[in-house]
Each structure stands twice: as structure tokens, then as C-alpha cells.
Image (cartoon, rainbow, N blue to C red):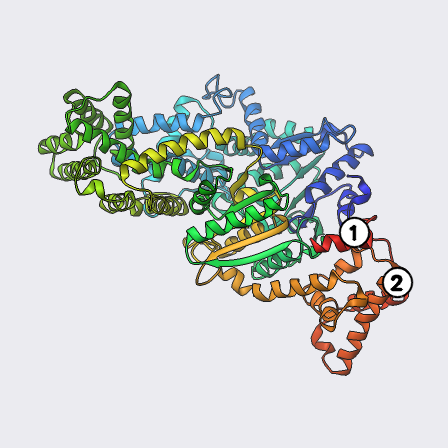
């Protein structure tokens, strides 16, 4: 893209030379593009040498994108583009080279990948060997949940106890002590032991790149000063995502010169759970005395999604007031539809995809954006039934997720129990399956059975070729009352479940009924909902289990359902190999920010989902919906389960918005000579009320005679309104009135994007 195609607001950012600056932009405003061209200009004009410019990104994907962009600009390959974690790591490496981190293992850098899992495994072993009071909880630990909880703490400078804080930082107002989740008080003890074990192992995790990096920069000038001296200019994209440790590292690096520019969208701050908050971005100008730039022209969305997004986000209070301004006209299709059941909703998405495919859209042009992975099963089930290729970004298909596989393993173990009860010997492959399934279920839900006791029970069952249900009941006789009760209860469940694979009443019941009763007997979904440090994680897992039970409905007996699941897994594995490049993508809204597609589907946009019923920050939930609405370039479909859509849509008056978009699209698709009175009102009043009149001023290339005729019709409307005493109610801003007056009498100005003929514009509107 040549620099001439930048908007004036983008060009102002490109022209910024020195000193602190903050860019606040709406979704799709081209913030990253403006940064790209600014860096190119800084190097081209020799204001800064390329290798003296630091560009920091929040993740590896964003860093790689910026490197690709800068490769198009002469001399920019030497610009240092790094992730914020890598910036922290450079401080750690400098401190290590100076002998300040002598406890680190000589191979610590080679062991960075996977270090957190390795440390956690060693920590669990240590906790059991010490017979920690919480040792019985560990077999049921969700490792990913604990590591995510701890990651958020480290990124925001929360220590497990005062003893772990470096002495010179104990009194720092930046550091805090970790507070465990209400339902998991032992998480704090496990965090403390984790850090002890990590130090003993001499390892550094990804989170320690930030925490330890911040410590080294704060404590040692010999680490900080060389890093400061390397760069004369610091640029950060997506600054709304930074946590406290990242913000403070950047502050120290940029402090000597304060040639420090950040960009971000406070309306897209989505990672509060890991410490990101709008205030970090919004307070930047005051903290540094920074010049503030605004990007309000949305270069991505058509009118429908844009106006919906404006109406949703304006209800947030912790934000800089701003409006998405229309640049791409009234084309495309926007729908908000309600359905009675998740299955009906999934079928509707399939129907819409098939219609779009008939219109030459490809699967890769489409994305389904969900609040959480718990919302994917109905969509996946519909796609599977319709043979639509899809990929779930960042997660397994719903039927492969651990919370679902636990129930499947209960069934597999019960099937093998039924074989042994019938006198059949297990094959070597079945023996391996028996061990794997037993390892996955004995502590899910949590039971007071140690790993050693579990292994002994498995060997007893296999040596005797006796069903595990029977072995558990027999072994429980020698246990203390509490453990005896748990083992007997599990044995009874397995003996009952084995009946589904033998001739009898249970074998004639549907898989759905059997699985539902299994869930109730175990209290499994309830257990999942309360056993996580991140409450939304447990809630989503419980919801996924409920969707899995629904998936079993109408699919025959438990035996046939499990066989069907195995075939499905094999079929999908083959399909995924072919579908990676040509498939509908399903991803969470969080991970969709910064991305765009011609077509976007948002399912389950309803109360308790968006906003999530466990959400502590209602404004972040609005930001999620705003982000989702602004991902589409052409078509947007929003679905909800009746009776009501998300309260965010209701408070936005979505029905009126869609009505107004239709009216404006109808009018704009006609020649002004053919406008009805309703068409004139849509252009003269509705476009002003919805804040999109600037589209006609800045982005439409009208032939002079057409432009004058349109303007005269609008002015006539205003005069009639004035005579009727209703002009004031229209709220016509002075610059809008002036535009139409000048348009009625003066030559047409050059459009913002030259070369768009009137006929081409009409065709664009009509799509």
C-alpha cells in the first residue's frame, strides 16, 4: 500500500518524530499500518538508525507480522522487533552473564520450553513426599488452570509470600502477595512450593522472563543501563494488553529518551484475568505528558456491524469517548436471529454457510467467534452432520477435550470390566487401554485414593482378570471409613455402568440416558464448575459436558455411541489434514482480536453467555462483544437462544439500528433523482443521527451533477423540517450542514480513496 492511501489521521502518526505519544484507535482503524509507515519514515529520514529502534509486540504472531511488514521498507530489516517476553528475557540473560543468577541451571535457556510443566510435575511429587495437607487434592488438579492462575500473578508482580520478594523490593508499591481463589485456598501453598522447587531445579519459565526480568532491571543498573543505551526509540503495538510487569519493563527501557509511542484500543482490552486493564493505556498520556492521536475511521466494517458496535460500547464508562466512522458503505448483510434450541441455532449457521458457499464464498472466508469453548459443541455438531470442514483454533474438538474424555474413559473401563466379568481375557492393547482409562478416572471427581494405591488396584484387577468395580469393593473393606465409602461408591458406579455392555435393562437404554445418569451419580459437571482457580474455566468445562450429553441423544445405545465416537475421531483426523487451509475457523473472541474475515458468525449471544454469568467486569464483557462485531468485512450473523438476546444488544436498540441501516442502504443504492421522501430522510437525517454522514463527505466519489442533485434534495429536506419546527430535533451538526450547502454549489472534492467511480460505488452498495 503506498503512503498516499493513508488517511490524514494515519499520516499524522507517521509524521510524529520525537517525544512520547499514544495512539487511541477504534477497531479496524489501521493502527498497525500507521506504525509500520512511521517506522519506515523514521529510518528513511535517518531520524533514528534502524538498529536503534525497538518495536515490542505482545505475542510472537504480532511480532512476526510486524517483521513481514517492515521487510517491505528499505533499511528496516535491522529494526529490533521482539515480544515483551523476549525483552524480559534479555534482561535475565544480561544478569546471568554478570553472575547475578548463579542458581540457574547452565542449560536453563534450552529448557525454557516446557519448563512450567516440568516444574509442576516435580512440585506435585515433592508435595506428596512431604505429605502436604493438600496432597489429596493434587490427583484432581487441572494443571492448565493452575498454571494460568499463577501466570497472571507473576505478570502482575504477585509473590507467594514475603520471603520470596527480593529484599530491596519488599517495600515497593508495585509488588503484592498472592491471594488464592475462594474455593481453592491451597493454591497459594502450591504456588509457594512451586517456586521453591523451581529455584532448586535452576529453571526459568515463560512467566519468569517477565518477573525476573523486571527484578533484574529494577535492582541492577549494570543490567538496565546497557539495555537503555541500545535504543533511542521504543514503539509498542496493542498496548492495552500489557500487564504490570511488561508496562514497568517498557517504562525503564524508554525512560532516558522517552521517544516512546504506544498504540491500542481501550475498547478492546480483553485480558483482565491476566492483568490487562484499560487504565494502563488511558493513563499513558498523563503519565508521560504524551501527545495523543486518535484513529476513528474504521477501514474494515460495513454499516451494520459498525453501528451495532458503536451502540454497544458507548455504554462503557471506563473509556475514551470515540465513534467508529464509516468508510466502507452500506453493503453486506447483518442479521440478528433467535432460536429455541442450540441444535436449531447450529442448523441455521449451516444453512447460512451453504447459501454463502453458493455465492462463491469459500470456507476459509468464514469464522465463528464464541465467548468460550463451551459454545463450540452445538456448532461443531451441526458442522459434523453437514460435513462442513472446520478447525477449532486453540482447542481440541469438543469430543476430544479432557473433561469429555473423562466420561468416555469411565465408559471404556466399564466395557472392559464387562468383558472380564464374562470371563474374557483382555488383549495387550485392551490391557493398556484399561490402565490409561483407570489413571484418568480414579481421581475425577477427586477421591482420597493415592497414585500408589490406584496403581496397585489396577495390577490386582489385571492379574486376577477381575472387574475393577469388584476389586474396588473388595479392597475397600480394609480402608478407613471415609476412603472405604469413596471406593465402594466408585465400585458401585463401575458395576452399574458395565451393565450397559451386557444383555439387560441398561443395555437397552439410550447413550444419552446412561451418560446423563453417570454425570448425576458422579456429580461430575457440578464438580468441574467449582474446582478451578479461573471460575470461567470450570463453568465452561461443565457446559461442554452438558453439550456432550446432548450430542449423545438419538445416537443409539452406549455401545453404538462409543463405536460412533471412534469412527468420528478417525474421520475428523483425516479431514483435518485436508482442511487446515480450507475450513471454517472456530475461535474465541479473545483470540480473534486483530483478525478479520469476510463473514463472521457469533452464536449464543444471549444472557449468561455474553455477558458470562460469572463475569466480574461487565465492561470487559461489552468489550468482547464490540470486538466480535468488528471482525467482519462483509457479512455478520448474530444468533441467540430465545427468549432474549444479550442485554448488550437490547440496550443498544439493535432492531432500530438494523432498520436504519436498511433504510440508508436502500437510499444510497439509488440515483438521487429516484429518491423517495423516505430515502431523502435516510440520507439527510438518519445518517446524521447515526454518525455516518461523513461517509458521503470523505469516501464517496460522486459525479458533480449527481452530487449537486443529492445535496439539493437534502437541503430541501432541512428547509422543510425548519418550517415544520422539527429541524432542531434532527441534531444536525454545523459541519454536516455546511458540507451539504457546499456540495449543492461547489465542485466535488477529491475522495479519500481515489478511483472509485459512481457506478462501482453503486455496485458495491448493492452487494
Residue identifier under label 2: 705
Element type where label 1 sits in the image: helix
Q: Which residue is mark 1?
A: 760
Numbered marks: total: 2
**Residue visible at 73% across and 82% down?**
725
> Residue 223, percent across and down?
59, 27
The residue positioned farthest toward the left in the image shown: 477
Q: Quadrant of residue 597?
A: top right
- Toward the viewer: 384 or 304? 384
Q: Few, some or many C-alpha atoms within 10 Å of disc 2 (few <14, some 14-19, many ≥20)?
A: few
Say left or right for 70 vs 600.
Answer: right
**Residue 455 image offset from top left, x and y in percent:** 22, 25
Q: Residue at x 35, y 39 (%)?
A: 403
Sequence-first disc among 1 and 2: 2
Is 174 drawn above or below residue 279 in the view shown? above
Quarter of the image for residue 135 reads top left
- Asked whether disc 1 touches disc 2, contact meaning CB atoms under 8 Å apart, the reply is no
197 vs 324: above or below: above
Q: Residue furthest bottom?
A: 724
- The kind of secondary structure element at disc 2 is helix
Image disc number at residue 26: none
| One can see residue 331 in this view | yes
Rendered image quadrant of residue 142: top left
Which quadrant: the N terminus? top right
Amino acid at each position: 500500500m503506498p503512503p498516499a492511501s493513508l488517511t490524514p489521521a494515519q499520516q499524522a502518526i507517521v509524521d510524529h518524530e520525537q517525544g512520547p505519544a499514544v495512539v487511541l484507535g477504534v477497531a479496524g482503524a489501521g493502527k498497525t499500518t500507521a506504525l509500520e509507515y512511521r517506522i519506515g519514515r523514521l529510518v528513511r529520514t535517518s531520524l533514528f538508525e534502524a538498529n536503534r529502534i525497538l518495536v515490542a509486540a505482545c505475542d510472537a504472531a504480532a511480532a512476526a507480522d510486524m517483521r513481514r511488514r517492515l521487510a517491505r521498507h528499505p533499511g528496516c530489516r535491522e529494526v529490533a522487533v521482539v515480544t515483551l517476553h523476549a525483552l524480559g528475557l534479555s534482561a535475565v540473560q544480561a544478569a546471568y552473564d554478570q553472575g547475578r543468577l548463579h542458581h540457574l541451571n547452565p542449560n536453563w535457556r534450552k529448557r525454557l520450553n516446557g519448563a512450567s510443566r516440568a516444574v509442576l510435575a516435580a512440585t506435585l511429587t515433592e508435595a506428596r513426599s512431604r505429605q502436604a495437607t493438600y496432597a489429596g487434592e493434587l490427583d484432581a488438579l487441572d494443571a492448565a488452570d493452575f498454571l494460568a492462575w499463577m501466570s497472571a500473578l507473576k505478570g502482575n508482580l504477585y509473590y507467594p509470600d514475603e520471603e520470596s520478594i527480593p529484599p530491596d523490593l519488599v517495600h515497593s508499591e508495585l509488588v503484592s502477595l498472592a491471594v488464592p481463589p475462594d474455593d481453592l485456598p491451597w493454591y497459594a501453598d502450591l504456588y509457594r512450593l512451586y517456586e521453591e522447587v523451581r529455584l532448586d531445579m535452576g529453571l526459568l519459565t515463560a512467566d519468569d522472563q517477565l518477573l525476573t526480568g523486571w527484578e533484574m532491571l529494577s535492582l541492577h543498573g549494570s543490567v538496565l543501563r546497557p539495555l537503555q543505551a541500545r535504543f533511542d526509540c521504543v514503539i509498542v503495538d496493542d498496548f492495552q494488553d500489557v500487564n504490570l510487569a511488561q508496562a514497568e519493563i517498557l517504562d525503564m527501557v524508554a525512560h532516558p529518551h522517552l521517544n516512546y509511542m504506544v498504540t491500542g484500543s481501550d475498547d478492546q482490552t480483553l485480558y483482565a484475568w491476566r492483568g490487562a486493564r484499560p487504565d494502563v493505556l488511558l493513563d499513558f498520556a498523563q503519565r508521560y505528558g504524551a501527545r495523543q492521536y486518535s484513529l476513528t475511521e474504521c477501514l474494515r466494517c460495513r454499516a451494520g456491524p459498525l453501528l451495532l458496535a458503536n451502540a454497544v460500547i458507548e455504554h462503557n464508562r471506563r473509556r475514551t469517548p470515540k465513534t467508529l466512522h464509516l468508510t466502507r458503505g452500506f453493503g453486506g448483510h447483518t442479521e440478528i436471529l433467535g432460536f429455541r434450541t442450540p441444535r436449531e441455532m447450529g442448523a441455521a449457521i449451516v444453512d447460512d454457510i451453504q447459501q454463502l458457499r453458493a455465492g462463491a464464498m469459500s470456507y476459509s472466508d468464514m469464522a465463528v467467534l464464541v465467548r468460550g469453548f463451551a459454545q463450540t459443541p452445538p456448532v461443531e455438531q451441526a458442522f459434523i452432520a453437514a460435513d462442513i470442514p472446520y478447525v477449532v483454533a486453540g482447542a481440541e474438538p469438543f469430543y476430544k477435550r479432557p473433561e469429555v474424555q473423562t466420561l468416555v474413559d469411565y465408559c471404556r473401563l466399564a466395557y472392559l470390566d464387562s468383558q472380564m466379568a464374562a470371563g474374557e481375557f483382555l488383549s495387550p492393547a485392551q490391557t493398556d487401554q484399561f490402565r490409561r482409562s483407570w489413571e484418568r478416572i480414579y481421581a475425577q471427581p477427586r477421591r482420597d485414593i493415592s497414585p500408589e494405591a490406584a496403581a496397585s488396584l489396577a495390577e490386582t484387577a489385571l492379574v486376577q482378570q477381575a472387574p475393577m468395580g469388584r476389586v474396588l469393593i473388595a479392597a475397600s473393606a480394609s480402608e478407613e471409613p471415609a476412603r472405604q465409602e469413596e471406593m465402594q461408591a466408585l465400585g458401585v458406579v463401575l458395576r452399574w455402568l458395565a451393565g450397559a455392555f451386557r444383555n439387560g435393562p441398561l443395555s437397552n437404554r439410550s447413550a444419552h440416558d446412561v451418560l446423563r445418569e453417570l454425570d448425576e451419580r458422579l456429580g461430575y459437571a457440578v464438580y468441574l464448575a467449582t474446582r478451578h482457580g479461573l471460575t470461567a474455566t470450570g463453568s465452561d468445562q461443565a457446559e461442554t459436558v452438558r453439550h456432550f450429553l446432548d450430542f449423545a441423544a438419538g445416537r443409539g445405545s452406549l455401545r453404538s455411541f462409543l463405536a460412533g465416537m471412534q469412527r468420528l475421531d478417525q474421520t475428523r483426523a483425516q479431514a483435518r489434514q485436508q482442511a487446515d487451509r480450507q475450513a471454517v475457523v472456530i475461535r474465541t473472541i479473545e483470540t480473534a482480536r486483530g483478525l478479520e474475515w469476510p463473514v463472521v458468525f457469533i452464536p449464543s449471544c444471549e444472557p449468561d453467555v455474553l455477558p458470562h454469568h460469572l463475569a466480574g467486569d461487565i465492561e470487559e464483557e461489552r468489550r468482547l462483544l464490540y470486538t466480535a462485531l468488528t471482525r467482519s468485512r462483509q457479512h455478520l450473523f448474530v444468533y441467540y437462544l430465545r427468549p432474549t438476546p444479550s442485554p448488550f444488544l437490547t440496550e443498544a436498540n439493535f432492531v432500530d439500528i438494523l432498520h436504519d441501516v436498511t433504510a440508508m442502504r436502500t437510499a444510497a443504492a439509488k440515483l438521487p433523482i429516484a429518491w423517495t421522501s423516505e430515502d431523502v430522510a435516510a440520507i439527510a437525517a438518519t445518517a446524521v443521527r447515526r454518525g455516518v454522514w461523513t461517509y458521503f463527505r470523505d469516501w464517496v466519489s460522486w459525479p458533480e451533477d449527481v452530487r449537486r442533485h443529492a445535496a439539493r434534495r437534502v437541503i430541501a429536506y432541512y428547509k422543510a423540517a425548519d418550517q415544520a419546527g422539527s429541524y432542531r430535533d434532527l441534531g444536525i451538526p454545523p459541519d454536516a450542514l455546511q458540507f451539504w450547502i457546499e456540495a449543492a454549489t461547489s465542485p466535488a472534492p477529491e475522495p479519500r480513496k481515489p478511483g472509485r467511480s459512481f457506478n462501482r460505488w453503486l455496485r458495491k452498495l448493492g452487494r
